[in-house]
Image: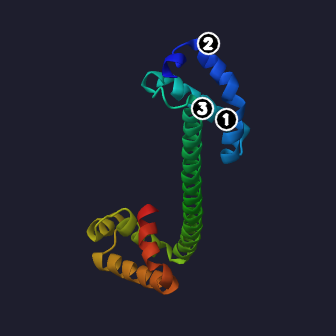
Amino acid sequence: MANELLDNKTFEDLFELHFTKLMGFVFNYVRDEEVAKDIVHDAFLTLWSNRKRLNPTYPVKSYLFTLAQNCALNYLRHLRVVTGNEQAVTELLEAANEDLNDYEKRLVRLEEKLAQLPEKQREVLVKCVVEGKKYKEVAEELDITVNTVKTHITRALKFLRDELQEDLIMLLLCLKRI
C-alpha cells in the first residue's frame, strides 16, 4: 500500500474517500468542526510525509484513523494544559490584585498618618528614613542639634508605631518608596 501512496493521484483519491469519515471520527473527540478539519489535514500530511516508511501489509485506513485519533488526543491534552494554565494565571492575577488593593489602602493610611505629624518631625523623618541621610547631615541642613534630630525621629516613629500597629512592616517598606 505504501508504494501506492507514492502516487499523488492515489493519495488524492484516498483523501476524498476518507476525509469525511475521519472528520466525523475526530469531531466525536474534539467537538469543534474547524479543529477536526485541522486534525484530519494534519493526519493526511503526516501520512504523506511518512509514506515511504509505511508497512505495506498494514491497511492505510487504519494508519489514518490511528493518526487522527492520536492527533485528537494530543489536542485534548494540550487544551487541558492550556485551560489549567489559564486558571492558574487568573488566580494569580486575582491574588495580585487583592494584594495591590491592600497595599494601596495601607499606603493611603500611612500617608494620612504622616500628614498628622508635626511638620518638623515629618521633615526629619523623611530626610533620615527615606533619603537615608545621617543624623548629623540633617542637623546641619536644618540648623538643629543631632539630639533634636533624634528626638524628632523618636517621637515620629512612636506616633506611627502607635497609630499603625498592624502595618508597621508595611510602614518601613512604604517609607523607602516615598
* Residue located at (54% from left, 17% from top): 4
Q: Nearer the viewer, residue 178 or 63?
A: 63
Residue 22's disc number: 1
Q: Residues within 10 Å of mark 1 (few under 14, many from 20)?
A: many
Q: Amino acid at mark 1?
A: Leu
Q: Nearer the viewer, residue 178 or 146?
A: 178
Residue wearing tag 2: 9
Residue wearing tag 3: 61
Q: Amino acid at mark 2?
A: Lys
Q: Is residue 148 left or right of residue 174?
A: left
The image shows residue 161, relative to residue 130, as above or below, that is below
Residue 28 position in % (x across, y down) = 70, 46
Say which label, 2 or 1, has the lower sequence index.
2
The image shows residue 151, relative to residue 34, as above or below, that is below
Marks 1/3: CA–CA distance: 10 Å
Residue 86 position in % (x across, y down) = 58, 54
* Residue located at (59% from left, 43% from top): 72
Question: Which picture quadrant has residue 97?
Answer: bottom right
Say which label, 1 or 3, has the lower sequence index.
1
Q: Amino acid at mark 3?
A: Lys
Secondary structure, mark 1, is: helix
The image shows residue 119, relative to residue 74, as above or below, that is below
Say which label, 2 or 3, has the lower sequence index.
2
Secondary structure, mark 3, is: helix
Q: Residues within 10 Å of mark 3 (few under 14, many from 20)?
A: few
